[in-house]
Image (cartoon, rainbow, N blue to C red):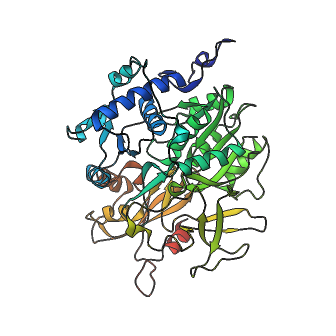
Amino acid sequence: MFKSRLHRFEFKKGDTPHVFLSSQHGMYTYSDLDRFTAFFKDLVEKKADSLKWPVAFLSESSDVLIFCIAACWKLGIPFIPINPNVKNEELKNYLDALKPVLIFCDGNNRGRLGDENVIKMDENFFLNSFTHDIRDMELPDPDTIDKEQIFGYFFTSGTSGKPKIVPLKRRQILSASSASAQNFKPDPNHFWLLCLPLNHIGGISIILRSVIYESAIYRLGEFHEEMVKEFLGENQRFQAASLVPTMLKRLLDDPLFKTHRDFKSILLGGGPVTENLLRKSAERGIPIISSYGMTETCAQIIANPLLAPSGMYTPLKSVGKPFPPNEIQIRDENGRVLGKNQSGALWLKGPQVFDGYYSEDENDRRFDKDGWFNTGDYGHMNGFGHIFIESRRNDLIITGGENVNPNEVEEAMLKLPTIKEAVVIGVPDEEWGQKVTAVVTLKNGKTPQLDEIREQLKDALTDFKLPKELKIVKDFPKTDTGKVKRWELVKKFG
């Protein structure tokens, strides 16, 4: 079993530093963050002449990346977090679209970029920040920065095949932080466990909310079951963790796992959650906040209240109610507002909802004249105002907290020599939330195996997009207009 260095978190009486971040590599205080922010400010002003232009980050999870994101927030510098696993063509499209004035990257990704406006975030970069002269340090008060200013540009995968760019404003994260704090927030010098990717709003919102709350983050570069079980089960300084259902299931696979008595909550999001998973958590007294949100709403905008250990949500599958003053309506396909227990499209309005996609043509029919946003997701509301999510973004697959656009996988599969037609669906799965499942018809010839298909696709698709299951059929159920009835495939193989 992994043995963590718990002594790192034991402070002597009368000598309590104000902790900002800790990881396996060290512990840092908010004074360290101020010094780094001054270093970062001077660097950007020297290289780019201004703090108003966006900077990009292309890096794996690291302590220095968290410092950079926090510094951007404190300085009002818009940032562009890019998934380091994107293919080169997609990376070029991102950079061409947003034209960051500087690109910060780790050593693994340095070779993918040119020489212009690129800064390597290596060990020397981090060390230099801690020797930076701060005698004349002048940092802006984050509260004075315009709340309508964009703080970041995020990439989201819709069903059209082309990632959308979502500009998020400071008011969105400030509103989300304030609303969420009514539910719970970690105490100073207590940790919020962060093991989510740092290019999604889910992981980045933990950084920004921690800075706003002045609480502490513990970073894990990747989910490590033994470490997480020890932190949440034994270490009193851990009070919160953000997990996707896949992670929670792996913790619950250990029949002895329980959280310690002072632990506040696991924030659960990033995909469908099975009722069995929630019931197991409740039976063990593990406090869970199940929620609903998306990039466009700056992460969770609907959530259940925090319950005492052994509490159970009623009804269990509800994701709760919207954070006030945000509002929700359930509408039919003609835009008519539906009554209780009627299924329809989820429309949202409020300070957490974004103002529109970066490309104007992607906003068509997504907003009505009164500013309501059509999420594209479907669900219903019961008589008590509890929201139930029935399907997410039509055909979008959410597996292990990652979004998979089925069109992208289908296009890659159709290039394979044995595949005639391909339809990719998300099949409900206890571990992954949804399992990427490829349903195919074949050309004449050898019947392919799943491992063979995955091997052929690995250069075109990132790992989480690769099919986990292969189903071979003679033909697809189709509508009169020739469209595949995806829902029938989900019903058949789900």
Left or right: 116 as drawn, with respect to 390? left
Residue at x-position 26% and y-position 37%: 118
- Quarter of the rendering containing residue 49: top left
**336, above or below 146, in the image:** below
Residue nearest the observer in this picture, 259 or 131? 131
From the top left corner, tell me how far across and down residue 382 is, in percent. Answer: 74, 68
User: Where's residue 99, x and y in %?
Assistant: 29, 50
Q: Quadrant of residue 446?
A: bottom left
Please, which residue is most extreme toward the left here? 115
Return the x and y of residue 265 as percentages of the image width and height: 69, 40
Q: Position of residue 174 (x, y in %)?
A: 58, 46
Left or right of 46? Residue 294 is: right
Q: Is residue 430 visible?
A: yes
How many numbered circles does the render carry? 0
Q: Is residue 455 above or below residue 59?
A: below
Q: Nearer the viewer, residue 282 or 153?
A: 153
Q: Looking at the image, can residue 273 be seen?
A: no
At x 48%, y 74%, the residue is 365
Q: Quadrant of the C terminus?
A: bottom right
Q: Residue at x 56, y 70 (%)?
A: 491
Does residue 284 sit above or below 332 in this rendering? Answer: above
Q: Quadrant of the N terminus?
A: top right
Choose between 144 and 199: the one closer to the eye: 144
